[in-house]
Amino acid sequence: MMSRFRNLVGALVLGAAAALSPAPAKAAGAAIAFPDYRFTFDGLFGTFDRGQLQRGFQVYKEVCAACHAMRQLSYRNLLEIGLTEAQVRNIAAQFEVTDGPNDQGEMFQRPARLSDRFRSPFANEQAARAANNGAYPPDLSVMVKARKDGADYVRALLIGYQDPPAGFALMDGMNYNAYFPGHQIAMPNVLNPGQVEFADGTEATVETMARDVTAFLAWAAEPELEQRRAMGVRIILFLIVLGGLTYAVKRKIWADVKH
Amino acid sequence: MAIGLHQSDFKNPVVRWIDSRLPVFTMMQKEYGTFPTPRNFNYFWNFGALAMVNLLIMIATGVFLSMHYTAHTAYAFDSVERIMRDVNYGWLLRYVHMNGASMFFIVVYIHIWRGLWYGSYKAPREILWILGVVIFLLMMATAFMGYVLPWGQMSFWGATVITNLFSAIPVFGESIVVWLWGGFSVDNPTLNRFFSLHYLLPFVIVGVVFLHVAALHITGSNNPLGIDPKGPQDTLPFHPYYTIKDSVGLIVYFAFFAFLVFFIPNYLGHPDNYIPANPLVTPAHIVPEWYFLPFYAVLRAVPDKLGGVVLMFGSIAILFILPWLDTSPVRSMRFRPVAKWFLVLWGINFCVLTWVGAKPAEGVYVTIARFATAYYFAYFLVILPLLGRLERPLALPESIAKPVLRGGGPLLAGAAAKPMEKA
Ligand code: HEM
């Protein structure tokens, strides 16, 4: 029944939406096709895999956080991916953040708390560029929403580092990536087999690290996704029942009017 | 009207006390209770009520968003993300508002299409129609400025492209643009005034909607046959017949809306708007929201900037004079065997403009946009005026009740003669 309902509503809405919207994003240049990976949160009813999110966070913390900020997230948000409060307090305490001014009027450093935002690796954009050959590693908080088919794209990007094809003119300090628009990316290949050690014994291949960190970024971009979908199912079911009743009342009221 | 207390028919003493001093209950009863409404509406007649509900939803969600939104270039983007993450049900508020704008345009486009198909713009409903076009313009201004508020890349570059259009105005163009921006580029002053106006205009829309409905209640509604009701056998009291029929439509509308909000909230948006605005990086393709695409296509179909701007505004302005361009006395396309097909083609053409508006302005797309633009205008300026003279309409039914009652049956018991007793 669920899937029939999904097909019906889905077909209806997507049909109308497709007719109305020519999917403006498709307009962007000669888009490079990237593999369509089946994440647990794909589709209309998908959910996150907490273990995967935790592994993904670990990859972010140990690899990506060296260059990329995630300034929309606070340490307390990590409670939502299934870490205990003690674990999250421990994680936060590993980072020094600036607080103040104190009663001497001076800023001071202290270990981060649950309420602090993720510490950014660089003080400002200029510092980030200076450390990265002039390129700016963008904030990753909403990266998955900021690219078309964001999760598939980010995962593809992370596994897309290759030797450039013969004759490809790679600029100095750039890296060849099969999926980055234009194929020249300032970000080096940062994932190597065994780079991190997952507590749950999952083997840290480039594939799994790329997949898991992407899932973490997808959660970070849409932390409300599961609540949203669950609420949507209930509301639409309610509307279907209410709609049926309303239609029955309408039929009754109009029964004496001939058309 | 004579001075003195209103003679109220209400029995409840409190209602009666108020009603005799301020007859709002009598007014509601007259305008939405017993209001004689053609008995043959189809579901196209739901969309006015839906637009009204949609406007209220936009205002309700907008007021709450404004409590948490910060209109400053340095904070706007993050404040919207705060709303999504830290405000209780903030993601719901924002997604309802964001998709509500799309729903509003879907509803209003269907509402306008209904008017075109059944000739609702013709005498005596010209002012009613013109007020509708005014609402449409105000909606476009409101939505355009709203889209700037989250201060993403498309917000910024969309605002830059659209405000720059005014520079095409001869002599004063450049000064007007600087005046609009409050500076020499789209910047903090622009964001601030857009927020102020974005808050204001919906209430102006409420005012114009009031006039729109007031005008409707003078002329009465049109109907699928496009002929005037000839007497009580042709109408039904608005309540309960159309209150319940509108309720059915409303629930379908809510289900569609809910599907967008809860399952594909960003489908109609552009991913670039999740990149914070950056005046130094131009996106590869600047595309407006889908509901502006047909007009964007017209704009870009013309090689000359001023010409493009004039045609774009002209494509909406032409609707103001439509009641006088269409010279046929027959309203409903049901009885216009030729015009009907030209209007169907116009509808398809409108979709083509929407589609081509999202494509880069190059090569074959420009050619398509030009033909589509030409037909858009030709329909109004050439085809309708000519068909009024050349086309031979089908015979109109004698009355609304006639075709449905087959041979003028007896008056309806209950329905028309005696409105259903209200509880
Ligand atoms: C005619 C009715 C309205 C339309 C068509 C409309 C349209 C829009 C649109 C398209 C956006 C951008 C959404 C996004 O991409 O994030 C927006 C944002 C916003 N609107 Fe409205 N709006 C309307 C009424 C209102 C009203 C009445 C208020 C205030 C009382 C309001 C307050 C806001 C605020 C604070 C934002 C920024 C937050 C955000 O971007 O989500 N809007 N509006």
Image: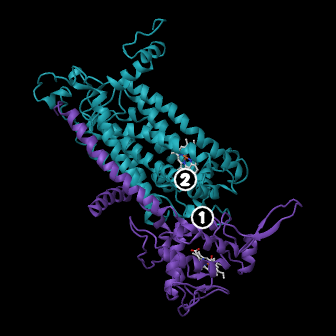
Look at chain A in the picture and name its colour.
purple
Query: Colour mode?
Result: by chain
Q: Amino acid type of disc 1?
A: Ile
Q: Name the residue tied to disc 2.
A: B90
| Label 2 or label 1, whichever comes before in sequence order | 2
- Where is residue B111 shown, x and y percent of the image? 37, 41
Is residue B263 among what the camera can see?
Answer: no
Q: Separation of disc 2 and disc 1 at Cα? A: 20 Å
Q: Nearer the viewer, residue B389 or B219?
A: B219
Q: Nearer the viewer, residue A12 or A50?
A: A50
Q: Amino acid type of disc 2?
A: Gly
Determine crowd level at label 2: few under 14, some 14-19, many 20+ residues with C-alpha closer than 10 A.
many
Q: Quadrant of residue A172?
A: bottom right
B132 in relation to A177, above or below: above
Q: Name the residue tied to disc 1.
A: B275
Quick one: quadrant of the N terminus of chain A? bottom left
**Left or right: residue A223 compared with residue B403:** right
Question: Subunit of mark 1?
Answer: B
Quick one: quadrant of the C terminus of chain A? top left
B187 in relation to B218, above or below: below
Is residue A48 among what the camera can see?
Answer: yes
Q: Residue at x 63, y 65 (%)?
A: A74
